[in-house]
Image: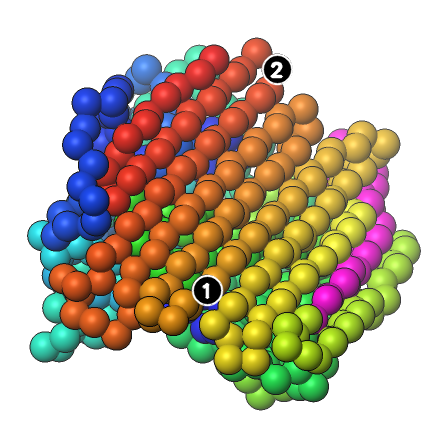
């Protein structure tokens, strides 16, 4: 356990464990025992077509150190021609028992970062969990045999005994008459290396950034970092807790995004996440950065420098990982697409930190950034002009006592994007919220009350995923003497034209007590 304060609907969803139709007939113990419910989530299952399907095992391994699994993926032949599937779904099944930290993991196929995940912390008796992800957008990569690399970095010794036993499969669904349009998936997915040489007929280019602060240091809890003048166990630079992911082309910032305030299953108290993980914890959602205005520049056949960095991290400090894929849509009727960047407006992030010392220390942080860029490409179907405008805001209020036995924090991040293509506007607005209350009393009893929100408006679709939990246990005693208790819950709502999804979960002491679907 590491203390927190120190330390598209069908496109992406989780399916963790078997969710019961009813959780009313249960007995709740007074404290956590040696066994509790497998991890579950309220997120919707992935919609799949009623067509023939085929499954392929991609990886099967036990992770007990930092040795990657390596193998070879071969596409199936019984579900239609490779690259012409209606949907592809990845599923990872895992089990672990004993004692273990949360760990980060990844799966690469053909060098493409397909999946990024973190793990649950197990009960003594062991748990099973599963994660599903729609990976249809990687169809071109999956169309031919590819090398596979997977790792869940782990440490196993006399104290930390949990070995992660996992299996990853891909299920392919044959195409049919109403299959999704070919334009919905990129023509190429290019792992970002030291430089990028784009296809010369690129029409649309996106950077897909799997950015996570991790590693057990302060950047794992970057939203709690303070300025150098504020006495606190996790200090940052002059920007305090402000962080911003930036994608640069040839040294100029070309796109920005707000990172999600991930809380892994050891954050604050492991009992907060014993059944319901924090939103996106088991299936890390990549940040999408639209580089289409730069297509004319990148189409010149030359290698260009494309870099990903995190603004706000103190110079020389590590703690962030940001593997990136470049998604490219090409003009099928033209070998070379010309174009140009026509306007660019960007300033440095504006960050204001106000620190007040006293018996209750207080750091208030407000920050933001804005980028607006326009470019065009001359395609086989005419000139296409694209304007990308992205606006970020951060507001964090952090209060703590000098001994940090009281440590409270609220945070709100907004990330608003408008992409205008020949006059048609597509909007994606995301809002992330975090509210954590951390106390240690005179009896060495740690209590953490936390809520996390992941909210999005994507065109006419509205998604609201909210987690809340309250957990307490006694520090500095054997695991069996902690007298741990926790109540947790998640409410996931989705509204779209003709679509309604509503699912609520609740737990007590690791027992699933509520499982209700609305709509």
Residue 207 in the image, given as x and y percentages of width and height: 60, 55
Of 441 and 84, nearer the camera is 441
Q: Is residue 383 magenta?
A: yes
Which residue is label 1 attached to? 439
Q: Give the range drawn in magenta.
A: 363-387
Q: Magenta part mainly helix, strand or loop?
A: strand
| Mark 2 secondary-structure assignment | loop
Toward the viewer: 441 or 123?
441
- In depth, the one of 109 and 157 nearer the eye is 157
Residue 455 shown left or right of residue 414 in the figure: left
Vertical comparison of 104 with 49: above or below = below
Q: Residue at (73%, 36%) from the top-left corner?
A: 427
Q: Residues within 10 Å of mark 2 (few under 14, many from 20)?
A: few
Q: Is mark 1 on a helix, strand or loop?
A: strand
How far across and how far down the image is residue 481, in percent? 17, 63
User: Residue visible at 58% across and 65% down?
Assistant: 223
Instruction: Please determine whether, in this image, residue 86 is positioned above or below residue 284.
Output: above
Q: Residue at x 57, y 11 (%)?
A: 498
Left or right: 432, with 380 as reference point: left
- Image check: 45 left or right of 54? right
Residue 499 part of the magenta-drawn span: no
In the visual, does 517 lie left or right of 151? right
Q: How far apart are marks 2 and 1 (CA)?
A: 44 Å
Residue 6 appears in the rendering: yes
Q: Where is residue 192 in the image (x, y as percent from the top left)?
A: 53, 64
Can I make out residue 197 in this image?
A: no
| Location of residue 299 (image quadrant) | bottom right
- Residue at the image position 12 percent from the left and 52 percent from the top: 34
Q: In which quarter of the image is residue 136?
A: top left
Q: Name the residue under label 2.
A: 497
């Amino acid at each position: 356990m590491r203390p927190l304060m120190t330390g598209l609907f069908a496109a992406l969803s989780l399916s963790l464990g078997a969710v019961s139709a009813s959780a009313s007939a249960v007995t709740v113990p007074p404290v956590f025992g040696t066994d509790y419910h497998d991890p579950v989530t309220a997120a919707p299952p992935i919609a799949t077509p009623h067509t023939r399907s085929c499954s392929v095992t991609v990886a099967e391994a036990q992770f007990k150190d930092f040795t990657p699994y390596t193998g070879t993926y071969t596409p199936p032949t019984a579900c239609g021609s490779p690259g012409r599937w209606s949907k592809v779904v990845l599923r990872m099944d895992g089990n672990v028992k004993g004692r273990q930290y949360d760990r980060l993991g990844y799966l690469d196929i053909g060098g493409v970062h397909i999946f990024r995940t973190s793990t649950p912390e197990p009960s003594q008796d062991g748990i099973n969990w599963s994660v599903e992800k729609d990976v249809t957008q990687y169809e071109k990569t999956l169309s031919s045999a590819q090398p596979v690399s997977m790792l869940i970095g782990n440490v196993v010794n006399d104290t930390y005994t949990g070995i992660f036993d996992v299996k990853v499969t891909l299920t392919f669904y044959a195409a049919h008459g109403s299959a999704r349009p070919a334009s919905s998936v990129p023509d190429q997915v290019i792992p970002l290396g030291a430089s990028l040489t784009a296809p010369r007929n690129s029409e649309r280019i996106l950077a897909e950034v799997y950015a996570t602060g991790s590693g057990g240091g302060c950047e794992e809890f970057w939203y709690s970092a303070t300025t150098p003048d504020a006495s606190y166990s996790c200090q940052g630079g002059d920007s305090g807790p402000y962080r911003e992911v930036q994608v640069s082309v040839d040294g100029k910032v070309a796109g920005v995004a707000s990172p999600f305030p991930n809380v892994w299953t050891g954050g604050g108290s492991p009992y907060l996440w014993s059944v319901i993980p924090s939103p996106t914890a088991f299936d890390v959602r990549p940040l999408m950065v639209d580089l289409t205005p730069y297509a004319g520049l990148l189409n010149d056949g030359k290698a260009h420098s494309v870099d990903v960095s995190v603004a706000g991290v103190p110079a020389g400090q590590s703690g962030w990982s940001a593997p990136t894929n470049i998604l490219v849509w090409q003009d099928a009727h033209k070998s070379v697409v010309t174009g140009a960047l026509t306007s660019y407006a960007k300033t440095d992030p504006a960050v204001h930190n106000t620190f007040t010392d006293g018996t209750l220390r207080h750091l208030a942080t407000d920050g933001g950034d804005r980028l607006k860029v326009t470019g065009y490409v001359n395609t086989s179907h005419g000139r296409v002009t694209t304007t990308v405008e992205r606006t970020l805001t951060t507001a964090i209020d952090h209060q703590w006592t000098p001994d940090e036995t009281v440590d409270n924090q609220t945070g709100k991040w907004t990330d608003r994007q408008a992409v205008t293509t020949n006059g048609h506007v597509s909007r994606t607005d995301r809002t992330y919220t975090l509210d954590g209350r951390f106390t240690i009393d005179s009896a060495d009893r740690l209590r953490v009350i936390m809520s996390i929100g992941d909210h999005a408006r994507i065109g006419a679709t509205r998604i609201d995923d909210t987690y809340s939990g309250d957990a307490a246990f006694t520090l500095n005693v054997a695991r069996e003497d902690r007298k741990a208790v926790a109540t947790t819950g998640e409410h996931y709502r989705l509204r779209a034209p003709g679509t309604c999804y509503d699912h609520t979960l609740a737990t007590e002491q690791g027992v699933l007590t509520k499982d209700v679907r609305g709509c």
